Every structure is written in C-alpha cells, then in structure tokens.
Image: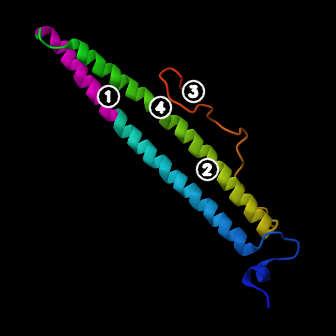
Amino acid sequence: MQTNEESMEEPGQSLPLLMAAELQDNLLSATNDLDRLQRLLLDACESLMGHFYKANHHLGSLLHQGAAYPNLDTHALHDAMQNITSAVTALQFQDMASQLIHHTNRRLRNCADQLAREAMGADPEGEAIIEEAPLRPNPVTQDEMDAGSVELF
C-alpha cells in the first residue's frame, strides 16, 4: 500500500508534490510576513520622524525665546536638539532594513517559484512567472548604525 506522498510523486521527481506544496506555502507565508514587517517598520519610523521633527522645532523655538530669559539653560536645549538629530540619523536603519527585507523576500519567492517548477514540471504554456533571484548576495554591508556611517543605495 502506498502512502499519500508516494502516490503523489511522479516518476523522475525527487520531491513529493505534497511536500513541495507545503514548502512553497511556508516560503510564501514567510514573504508575506516580511511584507508586513516592512510596513510596520515604515509606519513606526515615519511616526518617530514626525515626532522628532516636532520636538526639534519646539526646542528651537525655546532656544530663540531664551535670549529674553537670562536664566534659561540654552546649553541643555542645544544638547537636547543634538540628541534628537542623532536619533533621526539612527532612524536611517529603516532604509537598510527595507533593503534587506526586499532582498530576502525576492530570494524566498525565487526559491518558492523554483520549487514549484521542479515539483510540477515544465509549464506547457510558458506562463509561469518566476521571481528573479537578486544578483548581489547582500544589498547592505553594514551591521551597525553610527552617525556618518550610513550607506544608502
């Protein structure tokens, strides 16, 4: 008696269809999760950038008003503005994260497409679209964030 996996395997195929379909589903689920992660990162970074710019604007206004208040610690305001500027620079990680997510997403989709092509055989009508694998192994070579060290593509 044959198992389901054996009965779905065609001659000449090394991977049972059921297993190939399950792997493809898992790969596509991972790409959907990466898409969702990218949207979450973008939303969070846009929100943070907006709040940082507003805070920097308010601190700048206080600094300009400080001339009228001799007891106001303008040094502390300058430090706060510098810290906000550094935080905005650190948010550039979103660009690198997006590049890595997009790159990984393309790699996973390419694997899923190749798996489907191998498991199902050649497409007689030639209509199957296969995501091209990225040409470069890694779009971002950086692994830390320092002011002035961001590589943007």
- Could you say where residue 22 lies in the image, as x and y percent from the top left? 66, 69
Residue nearest the viewer, comparing 61 with 69: 69
Any mark on residue 105, and which?
Answer: 2
Side (left or right) of 69 relative to 147: left
State if disc 3 and disc 1 touch (CB < 8 Å). Answer: no
Measuring 80% from the left and 91% from the top, which residue is drawn there?
1
Q: Does dot 3 land on a helix, a strand or a loop? A: loop
Residue that badge 3 annotates = 151
At label 2, counting other C-alpha atoms closer than 10 Å, the crowd grade (few under 14, some 14-19, many 20 or more) is many
Q: CA distance from mark 2 to mark 3?
A: 21 Å
Measuring 63% from the left and 44% from the top, which residue is drawn there?
103
Q: CA distance from mark 1 to mark 3?
A: 22 Å
Q: CA distance from mark 4 to mark 3?
A: 9 Å
Side (left or right) of 91 relative to 19: left
Sequence-earlier tag: 1 or 4: 1
- Could you say where residue 107 lies in the image, as x and y percent from the top left? 67, 50
Sequence-earlier tag: 1 or 3: 1
- The quarter of the image holding the C terminus is top right
Sequence-earlier tag: 2 or 1: 1
- Which residues are the magenta region? 50-68
Residue that badge 4 annotates = 92
